Image: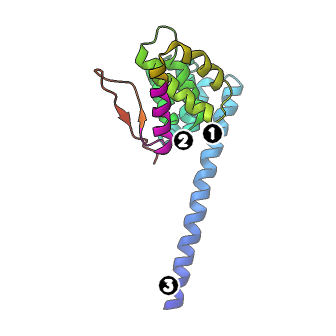
Amino acid sequence: MVRRLILSVCVVLLLSGVAGRLVASVDDRLFATGKRAYATGNYRSAAAAWRPLAAGGDPRAQYRLGRLHERGEGVAPDGETARALYTAAALSGFGPAQLALGRMLAHTGAPLDDLAEALTWLILAEERDVVGAAALRQALAPTLSSTDVRLAELRAERCRLSQYRVCAVTPTDGRWQYAASQSR
């Protein structure tokens, strides 16, 4: 009886590990399918491959799908959807999404609150050594007051120290709202 129980536990543990690797393997294959489709210009197929992964919280897929929406490749151009996808991926600590979100928020004519938030995300992307983040941060910082720059630095630090659980997002009615990463 005890021997059978131990054997059952071992089988369950073995299968749970195998099942986890199989799911990761399927997700990686689906992501790679999207990359191949994108590389050949088949943007609709890329979106179809990445959409379920993004919905499941994969930051790579969220970022790539966000790019498709920002550029209108294979999907209708939609800045709000792109921003939401970039934000979800950025809150997972995904550096390329942090750069994309910072760049999107820093576009010409953005309100001051967006520029301060943009600087926060660019600081975080730069800390992850994302190519282009430092140059964009250096270009944006002089356009803000020293107080806004310091506030962006403190927000980036809080975000990083909280392991991306507490990060500033766009203010509503003059009050900053904070997003909690849903991937943790």
Q: Find residue 97 and report its image quarter.
A: top right
Sequence-first tag of 3 and 1? 3
**Outermost residue, bottom direction?**
1
Asked if the magenta segment contains residue 151, the reply would be: yes
Q: Which residue is disc 3 drawn over?
A: 5
Question: Marks 3/1: CA distance?
Answer: 39 Å
Q: Which percent across, then down, holds residue 46?
A: 61, 30
Q: Which percent across, then down, holds residue 108?
A: 51, 9
Q: Which residues are magenta?
A: 150-166
What amino acid is labelled 2 in the image?
A: Asp
Is most of the magenta stretch helix, strand or loop? Answer: helix
Helix, strand or loop status at disc 2 = loop
Q: Which residue is disc 2 drawn over?
A: 58
Q: Is residue 82 visible?
A: no
Sequence-first tag of 2 and 1? 1
Q: Which label is found at residue 31? A: 1
Mark 2 vs 3: CB contact within 8 A = no
